Every structure is written in structure tokens, then in C-alpha cells.
Image (cartoon, rainbow, N blue to C red):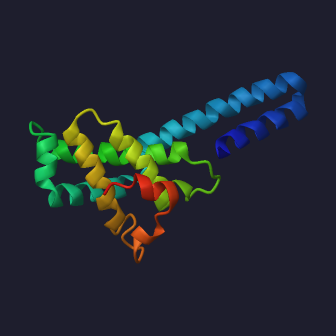
Amino acid sequence: MTLYIIIFISALVGGYLNGIGGFFVWGIIAFVAVLLVGIILQKISGGILPKKVRAKTASDYVAEKSDLITSAWPSHSSLERTKEVQRLLEAMYQRAVSESKSFHPDAPGELEHFVDSANLVASEQNSEETKAVAEDLINYLISHPLWYGHVRNPNNLLKGDAQKSRVP
């Protein structure tokens, strides 16, 4: 949402400096610039979620839940399974970011919002095995120290829709 504001302000400046044509030209230039910066930053970090957090969380999860992971991806190597978990983590966080209605940069990471978004990603998985992994991963993230494990009792934070949609 903040990016739209940046584009709109750029267009207003262009309109002020160059009239109606400047409004559209500066708006298009700002849109392209924001798009390119986003693509570059996503390529550098490997996604929206920081690479180190994604890698550490995925490797911890694969080490702890190897039987469940193996049932979902039996033909994959250990490294490929870790990459699949990283893909799930990234998809969950991307959904939380895209579904966020708040301007605050921490909003996608709020527990209620993240759980709702992550459950949507889990429900979209192709097989029952990967759906089970995604649902279990949500519960795992609630207690992982890099995610919500630092909160004294994260289950008390769940309210409303997030409580209803939380994986049992």
C-alpha cells in the first residue's frame, strides 16, 4: 500500500512541474522504478522473507519432522525437501504481506494475520501430504524462536477468526 502512495506522490510532483502530461509520465516512471527495485530486492534476498530466517526455520523443521516431510516428498533428497519447506514458508509470508490491510510494516507478521494467511496457503496445497506438512508447519512456527516462540504464550494471542481457523 505504501508503494501506491509513493507512486501517487511522484505523479503529483510530475503534475505540478509539467502539467497533466507530467502527472502521467512521472507516475509511470515511479511505477516502473518501484517495480524494478522490488524485483532486485527480491532476487537479492531470495524472497520477501529474509534468506537466513527462511533457511534456519526450514532446516530446523526438516530435522525435527523428517517422517512427515518424507511422506510428502518421498522422491526428493534432503536438500530438495528443505527447499520445498522454504517455498512453503515464503508462500505463507507472501500471502500475509499481500493480504495485509495495514500500513505498518510489522502487520504481516502479526500472529493472527499470519495464521489466517498461512492457513489459506495450506488449504491450496495439491496433495493431502503437503497440506498436512503446511498445517503442521504453521503450528511449528508458533513455537519457533525466530517466529513466535519468543512470545510467552502465543496461543493466548489468537482471537476471532484466527482462533477459528487455527490448525488444531
Res 48 visible = no
Q: Position of residue 119 (x, y in %)?
A: 38, 47
Q: Position of residue 6 (x, y in %)?
A: 71, 42
Q: Position of residue 143 (x, y in %)?
A: 32, 67
Looking at the picture, tell me which residue is in the foreground, 135 or 102. 135
Looking at the picture, tell me which residue is in the foreground, 74 or 7. 74
Res 72 visible = yes
List the single residue furthest toward the bottom: 152
Q: Residue at image x 38%, y 55%?
A: 166
11 lies left or right of 102 = right
Q: Is 38 above or below relative to 156?
A: above
Quadrant holding the N terminus = top right
**What is the count of numbered marks?**
0
Q: Residue at image x 22%, y 34%?
A: 127
Q: Residue at image x 78%, y 40%?
A: 9
Q: Is 149 above or below relative to 31?
A: below
Looking at the picture, tell me which residue is in the foreground, 31 or 123. 123
96 lies left or right of 54 = right
Q: Position of residue 17 (x, y in %)?
A: 89, 33
List the single residue furthest toward the top: 21
Quadrant holding the C terminus = bottom left
